[in-house]
Structure formats: structure tokens, C-alpha cells
Amino acid sequence: MSERDERPEDAAGASDEASQPSEPGTSEEEAWREIVENYGERPSLDETPVAPSIFEQKIDIVEPVDEPDPYEDMWRDDDEGYVPPPPPPLPRTTPARFLAWLGVLGAPVAVLALIVVTQVSGRSFSSWVIGGLVAAFLAGFVYLLVTMSNEPRDPWDDGARV
């Protein structure tokens, strides 16, 4: 057994030495009481103040001068005589290429629309309608692949024209 085990304990389970402060006036409760009592008070500084002449100097206020700003007109819009060039014409495609794109993009949209109509109305469509849409998609896709250029594009050509 150690010395700690041999000490008598009070009803709360604490030893006699722990319940009594070791030195009078230095208990933890007194330290906290002192902190709470002095809370908010500022300690007095016995140092000499900074030279008051620094803070007492009078600052001359400079009045703004009404000079024209050289950058004022920089962002002004000069629309007075400017006529923008006409927009470039939209690219034209051949009718066959237009039908191919219509089959590739339009056939899946039409199939989705038919599915929605079938679910909502309960009406069924014949298999030749769905088969025709699948054939239009495949035909358009194959046509676009066959007519695609075999030559690589110029990597520095972004399509802009001056």
C-alpha cells in the first residue's frame, strides 16, 4: 500500500490534505475571487507619456484642384460616326447534309416524344414508325461520316477572318 491509500478520507471521498489549502491566502477560490473583483479595471501606467508635440502638430489640409482628368474620356463610347460592319452571313449547307443532321438529331427527339405520347394517351404506334426513325438516325450518321474530310485542319486556323 502507498501513503495515499493510508490517508483517511472524508464522506465525499476526498483526502484531508486535498480539502484544506496548503497555505492560507493562496487558495484557488481566493485567486478567482480576486480576478472577478478586478475585472474591467485598467492598470495605471506610471510610464512617461510620448512626446505631446507629435500629436499636437497641425496638419494643413490641401484643397482639391479642379484640373481636368486626362483619363476621363478614355472609356467614353464614340458612337457618333461609327457604323458597325454587317454581320457575316450564316453558313449554308447542302440539302443532303441538312437532312443527315435532321436524322441524327431529330430522330432521337421524335422517339422520346413518341414514348411520352404512348405513356400519356395509351395509344401505340406501329413498328414501322419506330423503324423509320432508327433508319433515319443511322442513315444520317453514316452520311456524315462518309462525307467528313480526311485532311486534318490547319491547327492555327481558328476560323476568324480579318
Image: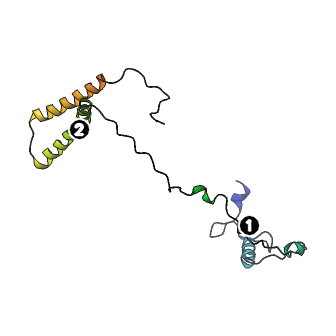
Q: Is residue 155 above or below residue 11?
A: above
Residue 158 appears in the picture as rendered: yes
For the residue carrying disc 2, how many other residues have a C-alpha within 10 Å: few (<14), some (14-19), or many (20+)? Answer: some
Residue indicated by mark 1: 17
Q: Is residue 137 above or below residue 23?
A: above
As shown in the figure, which amino acid type bears the numbered disc 2? Gly
Q: Is residue 100 left or right of residue 154?
A: left
Q: Closer to the N terminus: mark 1 or mark 2?
A: 1
What percent of the width, then of the height, locates residue 7?
71, 63
Residue 49 appears in the picture as rendered: no
Which residue is more in the foreground, 108 or 5?
A: 108
- Give the quadrant of residue 5: bottom right
Which residue is more in the foreground, 88 or 80?
A: 80
Q: Is residue 59 left or right of residue 78?
A: right
Residue indicated by mark 2: 106
What percent of the width, then of the height, locates residue 142?
26, 25
SS for tag 2? helix
Count of numbered circles on the image: 2
What percent of the width, then of the height, locates residue 116?
17, 46
- Give the quadrant of residue 90: top left
As shown in the figure, which amino acid type bears the numbered disc 1? Glu
